[in-house]
Image: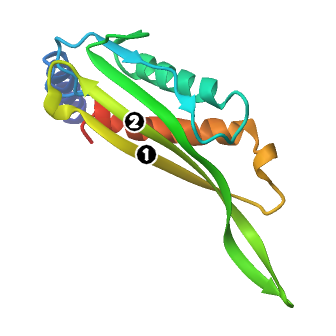
């Protein structure tokens, strides 16, 4: 029993030392210590679809996620890291179609939410990218694009933000 406690204590101590030295982070964040800020621009909705607050939901999700998961200060512009983007896709399409008699009917609809991201790392331009990120979720055929539950959009946005976060500061 004593050996197990000693091993556990040593493991925790080593992990804490590595974390403090910048070697490892439990959140997977890998940010150069000289980087202190990130600017996140408002995400415009160029898709033209979705709820009227989609721009606000997406933009706030990005800002909140980076604030929760890094020590970076979020700025409106001119950060050490710069994140700009736009919502390029918000579509609901039939995903699973079933024929009943002479009529094809959707048994599932797929909502696709996509953003185009331009990321700039002012201290290391090799990490810059311009890439589209897309998330999908399935809905029953009774749900149309005008009544997608806000909680579902929040869930999708959170997954989308996590993908961008992993690409920008977690190096995944």
Label annotation for residue 11:
none
Dot 2 corresponds to which residue? 117
Q: Which residue shows up at 61% across the image and 28% down it?
A: 55
Q: Which secondary structure, mark 1? A: strand
Q: Which residue shows up at 23% across the image and 35% down it?
A: 4
Q: Using residue 149 as the reference point, say whether residue 122 is left or right of it.
A: left
Dot 1 corresponds to which residue? 133
Q: Using residue 92 as the reference point, say whether residue 30 is left or right of it.
A: left
Task: Decide which of 3, 10 is in the foreground and name it.
Answer: 10
Q: CA distance from mark 2 to mark 1?
A: 7 Å
Q: Using residue 22 as the reference point, say whether residue 118 is left or right of it.
A: right
Q: Position of residue 56 (x, y in %)?
A: 62, 23
Q: Quadrant of residue 76?
A: top left
Evaluate if marks 2 and 1 touch, with contact meaning CB atoms under 8 Å apart.
yes
Q: Position of residue 72 (x, y in %)?
A: 33, 13
Regarding residue 27, the answer to whether it shows in the image is no
Q: Counting residues from the N terminus, which is met first, the one under dot 2 or under dot 1?
A: 2
Task: Decide which of 70, 9 is in the foreground and name it.
Answer: 70
Q: Position of residue 162 (x, y in %)?
A: 43, 37
Q: Which residue shows up at 19% across the image and 30% down it?
A: 11
Q: Position of residue 88 (x, y in %)?
A: 53, 43
């Amino acid at each position: 029993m004593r050996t197990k406690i000693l091993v556990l204590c040593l493991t925790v101590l080593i992990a804490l030392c590595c974390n403090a030295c910048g070697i490892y982070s439990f959140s997977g964040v890998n940010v150069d210590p000289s980087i202190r800020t990130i600017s996140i621009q408002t995400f415009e909705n160029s898709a033209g679809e979705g709820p009227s607050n989609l721009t606000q939901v997406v933009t706030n999700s990005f800002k909140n996620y980076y604030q929760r998961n890094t020590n970076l200060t979020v700025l409106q512009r001119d950060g050490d890291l710069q994140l700009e983007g736009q919502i390029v896709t918000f579509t609901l399409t039939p995903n699973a179609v079933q024929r009943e008699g002479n009529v094809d009917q959707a048994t599932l609809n797929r909502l696709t939410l996509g953003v185009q991201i331009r990321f700039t790392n002012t201290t290391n331009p090799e990490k810059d990218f311009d890439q589209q990120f897309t998330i999908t979720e399935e809905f029953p055929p009774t749900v149309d694009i005008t009544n997608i539950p806000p909680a579902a959009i929040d869930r999708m946005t959170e997954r989308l933000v996590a993908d961008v976060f992993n690409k920008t500061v977690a190096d995944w």
